[in-house]
Every structure is written in C-alpha cells, then in structure tokens.
Amino acid sequence: MNLASLLSKDRINLSLKPGKKDEVIKDLVYTIKKGDDAELIVSTLLKREELGSTGIGKGIAIPHCRSLAVEKLEIAVGRTTKPINFNSIDKKPVSLIFLIIAPPQDPGNQYLITLGKIVQIAKEITKKNLIQKAETPDDFITLINEIEKNLAKRK
Amino acid sequence: MSDIIEMHLNLLFDLDNLIADMEEPSYKKIGFQIEEEASLVLIRKRNELLKKLPPELAEAYEILKRRYRQAIAPVESEFCLGCFQKLPTQLSARTKQIVTCPNCGRILYWRRK
C-alpha cells in the first residue's frame, strides 16, 4: 500500500488558515465531509486529542480516528501559514497536519498500517527539514512518493 | 430516533472503536503519546453517553456490542456491512425509529450522501 496513492490534490491545503487546534482540525475535516458527518468526526477526533496530543513533535501532528461517517480510509493534509499550538509532545508549535479517518470495518487493518506509515514518513520530513519544501499539492504528493521509495530501499 | 440521540449513539460507537484501537498492540507500537489515565477517561465518557440514550436503546447497544464487538453497522448499496446480507427494500433511514438489521440485529447506519 502506497501512501501517495491515498492522497488527493483537493485534500491537500498548503496555505491552511492558522487558528486554534480544534478550528484547524475542523477545517481539515470539512475537506472530507460536511454537516452532521463532519461534526461527528470532529467530536471523535477531539476526544482522541484529550487523551494525549497527536502532535508527534518537530512541527507535525497526525490527528486520527475511526468513524461511521466515512466509507473508506480518508486522508487530508494541511500546512498552516503560521505554526499553531497543538500541545505537542515537544511543546513546539505545529504547521504540518496529516488527518486520517478510517471506517469502523476495515479489512486487513489498513488504518493502523497507514497510521504507522504516516508516522514514519513524518519523521523523515522532520529529519530532513522538508515541512516547507512543497509549493503545490502536486509537489507534496511527489515528495511523499520519494520519501516512501527511499524508505522502501532501506528495508 | 431524534437527531440528538442519533448523534450520541454514533459518538458512543466511535468512542468504543477508539477504546478498542488504543488497546491494540499495533496501535501502541506506533508510539503516540497517551495520558496514563486515557482508557479510564474514555470509558467514563462512553458511559456518560450511554446514559444519555433511552434505556432500551442503551441496553440493546450493550447487548449487540457484547455479541458482535461493533453494535452498529453501516449500510452500503442496501447491504448491512455487519453481516453482508441484503436488506429489504422497505427499510429506510428516513424513519424516526431505530432501524436494525433483520438478519443480524445490528443497529443500521445510513451515511449521508
């Protein structure tokens, strides 16, 4: 399974409006779903955040949950124009957010596999200081593709 | 079923899935920071939501959860995604009543288009 293939240009916003953590999460969720479905996803994501921030450090956060409101694994990516407070593990502000929502029924546990992969890719992005590298959604998908290929070579 | 009850029920279901995922070794291995009391906090929150449901619905939910692990099943192309049986065409999301699968008994959920 290739992460780049799960990304779509219209769900990558590289000039996301900065704001409070819950507002930014909501903006990203609304690129996937609208109305009551979106509100259900936001509620579950925020409950998850209460248990410990998904800000993994060095400027990246990966909010995630399963929800009845989606039919398949959905990913949205946002890069805020200014870093925002996400109560991250390292207390540093966040500017790159990968949001992942999975359906409750998930054959092959694709959700947890994808989540693990995003964490791995996020660590590469921070290690090589690539958060600001992509200028367009297409660039971003290409970047993710390259990182994935490099990670695969190392295995 | 009123919109607010439906919202509580769906959130309860999503929280139960969150609890199940957090107990998965493969989730723990990913290494997200989790507060020490996280499971207890989640269980308290799901129990609060359960109390907001009509008692008969709360009871049915708990019985179905014990039986199937997931008490609610989405509907896709007129199939229950819990038991993968085709649903009778007269079943509809537009009812005020809770709708269950005639085959497996799971509570059905129609996604909004």
Image (cartoon, coloured by chain):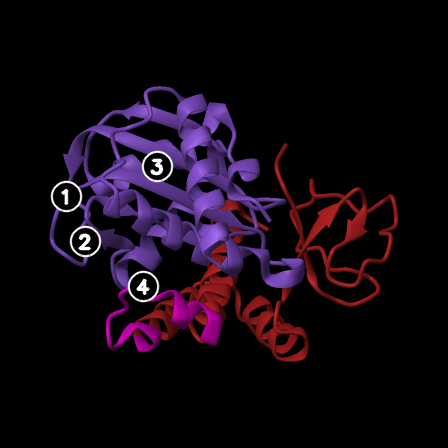
Location of residue B107 by image quarter: bottom right
First in residue order: circle 3 vs circle 1: 3
Q: What stretch of residues is rendered in magenta?
A: B24-40
The chain letter corresponding to red is B
Q: Is B46 left, or right, of B90 in this rendering?
A: left
Q: Are marks 1 and 2 in contact (CB under 8 Å)?
A: yes
Letter of the chain shown purple in the rendering: A
- Marks 1 and 4 sit apart, C-alpha to C-alpha, by 17 Å
Amino acid type, label 3 = Lys
Return the mark for residue A88: 2
Give the side of residue B73 with respect to residue B12, left or right.
Answer: right
Residue under label 1: A93
The label number, if any, that marks residue A35 in the structure image:
none
Is disc 2 in the same subunit as disc 4?
no
Mark 3 against mark 1, which lies toward the viewer?
Answer: 1
Query: Going by the picture, which residue comes out furthest to the left?
Result: A91
The reply to the same-chain question for discs 1 and 2 is yes
